[in-house]
Image (cartoon, rainbow, N blue to C red):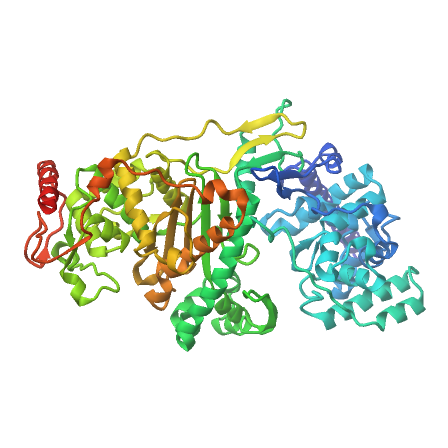
């Protein structure tokens, strides 16, 4: 009986083992044959070393950046100090020269010690070759099967790497692709970042330090945690001694030296035009998907050595970034002083709580069924963090919530400069710092544009026959069918409310009440149609507040509309990629002839609007361009400020360049504390002003900075020849109800025609 039982038990175990082996083999082959995603072939892997970085060029063929698989500053194996290689092997893969990509001894150790005995000190089982596969091809998400699928893929690819490349090549590729602390890729960039020296000049201590960070790049960051990093360095030195790469005396002598970090911050996310480079990268990838080589394969941005030609001017870009940084640093200080301890990122607990609950970490812990108290306790744990500041990064003890509140306070920005003749983008700033704030406020953001929309309202009025010398009263009116909405004018004194302004005066001083009245008289539909002719295709709210810029537009949409004022009434659609060449110089993509839209408005209207917007610069809401910044360029423009001081805008025009700037907080619930700081003239205009000051000092840009608008025609001069303001009693505004409260409606066609004639009559009468 006992024998039969043992025999039955043995058969059961044998069947179980065979079933397990069968399942493992089935799983292995399911990965091998691509059921979990296609694996790179040996041909794909063999082409990696031949991969050439694609280069990004500005309009003058200056290098803006590169797109690549390997680090932008790759090193060859024969330039690496021996102690870097020795440290890597001693720490990461001691049998590297003995295995063929998979270290079965390490796998067995991991299986028995880590899995069966739950001993985490056994280390990992991945070889350098497997880690190289992960560095280059990344890992996919497969739910519960993610780890086994990815590990199996890496084992298969490691074998292929070993079949195709020498051990020296694999080490060089690994060190050129592995991520070090602060998301720095490659040994050369890490050497420059933490020790301000090339990899070939690293000493033993520095080499051991960098290799030591690979175990946990953040935890062993030598800048943030120098003591911990030094201890980890000493572990690497012990490993090197253990495997006879260095002597005991060398290890002791090196361990007794203090770790000295010589930090230099630079990476691909920094430098000039970081947001622009990322935008081009995304657009080129889409373009390449629609193109194919002669062999029907698609182009690869990271391997095919393409040349991407753009419209950007690197010198203009640097001037723009310098202007932005100088102004935003000052404006941020103004903002924080104005709020004091009542700042929303400090005192608005409801807002902070909502932001905390929107954190990916909070959501992840919540999904794992953590209690609210446990989550908050975790988020309040303080560790050393590197925080952004305009004076340079701050290293301090801070929790996740502390870091969030610190980030919440920062104003962000967007700036773009465009050649109005063809739409070529010459400078592009998507935000204040690409490394910390990756959201692009030019291409992916829409915000209310405030009073920068008013020129479209006045353009519509002129196109519909109204005279520039039409007068409108400043006084406020309540619109009863708009929930008793009463547009107000910021900063206007009581005495001013008895004045009547011409179009030029009303636009230059950005008078809200008059803009709404003009929109009322010309009709909302007409304004929307005019905006569409000027290249605006976002949905526009058909409400009276449209006159005040409640429409949400992108910066490219807004600046595209303004190009029509400097381009004979034609809209130039902004663009930045001109052509793409393959590595042999053949053009695989070229932008078609410059975009010229249909005429958006008449030449008379265009010249009139330019003169009116010149008044904005010379004596109106943007007069600090002259008074504060001393600019004598021929300029037109318009400031903009949205409700509750959430956004500040400025659009500046010269004959050969249109510039737009926006400043605000990424969280719409946080605005400026007061109009004095938040108005577009203070928050956004200075970026353009400081940018132009630098261009004025560079003779290279004389064709832009010294350009003059054409002298307006006699007809336009005559149309603007009137007093800018009148007092009540001298002139009554026509076609309005006399009572303070009134309804808002769009005029009929008959009413519009009647107004055209009467406005002309009114102008003639006033000149008599």
| Position in image of residue 402 (x %, y %) | 52, 71
Up-down: is 188 above or below 195?
above
User: Is residue 368 among the parts visible in the rendering?
Assistant: yes
Question: Which one is in front, 450 or 313?
Answer: 313
Q: How many labels does the image show?
A: 0
Please tell me which residue is depicted at 30% across the width and 34% down the height of the picture: 600
**Camera sees residue 647:** no
Residue at the image point whose x is 74% and y is 42% from the top: 156
Q: Position of residue 394 (x, y in %)?
A: 59, 69
Of the 4 image quadrants, the one containing the C terminus is: top left
- Give the quadrant of the N terminus: bottom right
- In the rendered view, would you say 22 is above or below 422? below
Name the side, left or right, on which 9 lies relative to 244. left
| 759 vs 487, nearest the viewer | 759
Q: Which of 76 and 569 is in front in this view?
A: 569
Q: Say left or right for 323 vs 487.
A: right
Apparent side of residue 661 relative to residue 438 in the rendered image (left or right): left
Coordinates of residue 761 in the picture (x, y in percent): 9, 41
Residue at left offset 63%, top offset 25%: 586
């Amino acid at each position: 009986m006992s024998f039969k039982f043992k025999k039955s038990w043995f058969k059961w175990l044998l069947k179980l083992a065979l079933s397990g082996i069968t399942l493992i083999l089935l799983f292995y082959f399911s990965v091998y044959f691509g059921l979990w995603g296609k694996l790179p072939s040996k041909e794909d892997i063999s082409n990696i070393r031949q991969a050439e970085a694609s280069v990004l060029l500005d309009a003058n063929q200056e290098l803006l950046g590169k797109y690549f698989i390997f680090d932008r500053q790759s090193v060859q194996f024969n330039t690496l100090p021996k102690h870097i290689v020795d440290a890597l092997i001693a720490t990461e893969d001691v049998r590297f020269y003995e295995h063929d990509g998979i270290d079965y001894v390490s796998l067995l150790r991991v299986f028995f010690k880590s899995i069966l005995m739950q001993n985490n000190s056994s280390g990992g089982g991945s070889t350098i070759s497997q880690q190289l596969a992960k560095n280059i091809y990344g890992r996919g998400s497969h739910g519960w099967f993610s780890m086994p699928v990815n590990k199996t893929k890496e084992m298969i690819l490691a074998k292929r790497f070993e079949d195709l490349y020498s051990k020296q090549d694999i080490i060089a590729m690994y060190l050129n692709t592995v991520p070090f602390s602060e998301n720095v890729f490659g040994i050369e960039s890490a050497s420059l970042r933490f020790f301000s020296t090339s990899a070939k000049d690293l000493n033993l201590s520095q080499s051991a330090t960098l290799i030591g960070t690979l175990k946990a790049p953040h935890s062993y960051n030598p800048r943030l945690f120098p003591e911990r990093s030094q201890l980890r360095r000493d572990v690497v030195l012990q490993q090197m001694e253990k495997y006879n790469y260095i002597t005991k005396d060398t290890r002791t002598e090196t361990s007794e030296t203090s770790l000295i970090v010589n930090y230099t911050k630079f990476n691909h996310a920094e430098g000039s035009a970081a947001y622009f480079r990322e935008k081009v990268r995304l657009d080129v990838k889409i373009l390449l998907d629609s193109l194919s080589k002669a062999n029907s394969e698609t182009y690869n941005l990271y391997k095919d050595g393409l040349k991407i030609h753009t419209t950007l001017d690197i010198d203009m870009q640097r001037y723009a970034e310098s202007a932005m940084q100088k102004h935003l640093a000052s404006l941020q200080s103004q903002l924080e002083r104005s709020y004091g301890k009542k700042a929303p990122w400090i005192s608005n607990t409801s807002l902070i709580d909502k932001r905390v609950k929107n954190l990916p970490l909070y959501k992840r812990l919540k999904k794992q069924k953590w209690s609210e108290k446990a989550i908050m306790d975790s988020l309040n744990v303080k560790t050393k963090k590197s925080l952004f500041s305009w004076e340079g990064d701050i290293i301090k003890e801070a929790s996740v919530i502390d870091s969030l509140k610190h980030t919440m306070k920062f104003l962000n920005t967007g700036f773009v400069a465009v050649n109005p003749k063809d739409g070529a983008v010459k400078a592009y700033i998507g935000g204040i710092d690409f490394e910390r704030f990756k959201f692009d406020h030019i291409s992916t953001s829409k915000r209310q544009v405030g009073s920068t929309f008013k020129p479209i309202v006045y353009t519509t009025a002129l196109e519909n026959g109204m005279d520039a010398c039409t007068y409108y009263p400043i006084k406020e009116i309540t619109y009863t069918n708009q929930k008793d909405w009463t547009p107000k004018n910021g900063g206007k004194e009581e005495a001013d409310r008895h004045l009547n302004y011409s179009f030029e005066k009303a636009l230059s001083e950005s008078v809200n009440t008059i803009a709404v009245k003009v929109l009322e008289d010309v009709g909302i539909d007409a304004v929307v149609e005019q905006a569409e002719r000027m290249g605006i295709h976002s949905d526009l709210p058909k409400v009276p507040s449209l006159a005040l810029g409640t429409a949400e537009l992108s910066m490219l949409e807004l600046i595209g509309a303004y190009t029509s004022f400097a381009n004979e009434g034609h809209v130039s659609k902004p663009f930045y990629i001109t052509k793409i060449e393959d590595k042999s110089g053949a053009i695989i993509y070229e932008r078609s002839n410059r975009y010229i839209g249909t005429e958006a408005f008449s030449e008379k209207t265009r010249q009139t609007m330019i003169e009116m917007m010149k008044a904005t610069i010379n004596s109106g809401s943007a007069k600090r361009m002259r008074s504060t910044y001393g600019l004598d360029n021929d300029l037109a423009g318009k400031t903009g400020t949205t409700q509750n001081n959430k956004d500040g805008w400025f659009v500046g025009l010269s004959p050969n360049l249109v510039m737009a700037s926006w400043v605000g907080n990424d969280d719409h619930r946080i605005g400026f504390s007061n109009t004095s700081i938040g108005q577009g003239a203070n928050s956004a205009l200075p970026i353009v002003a400081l940018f132009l000051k630098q261009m004025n000092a560079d003779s290279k840009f004389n064709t832009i900075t010294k350009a003059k608008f054409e002298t307006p025609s006699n007809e336009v001069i005559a149309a603007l020849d009137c007093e800018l303001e009148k007092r009540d009693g001298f002139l009554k505004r026509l076609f309005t109800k006399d009572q303070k409260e009134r309804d808002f409606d769009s005029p009929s066609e008959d009413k519009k025609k009647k107004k055209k004639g009467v406005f002309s009559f009114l102008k003639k009468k006033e000149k008599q």
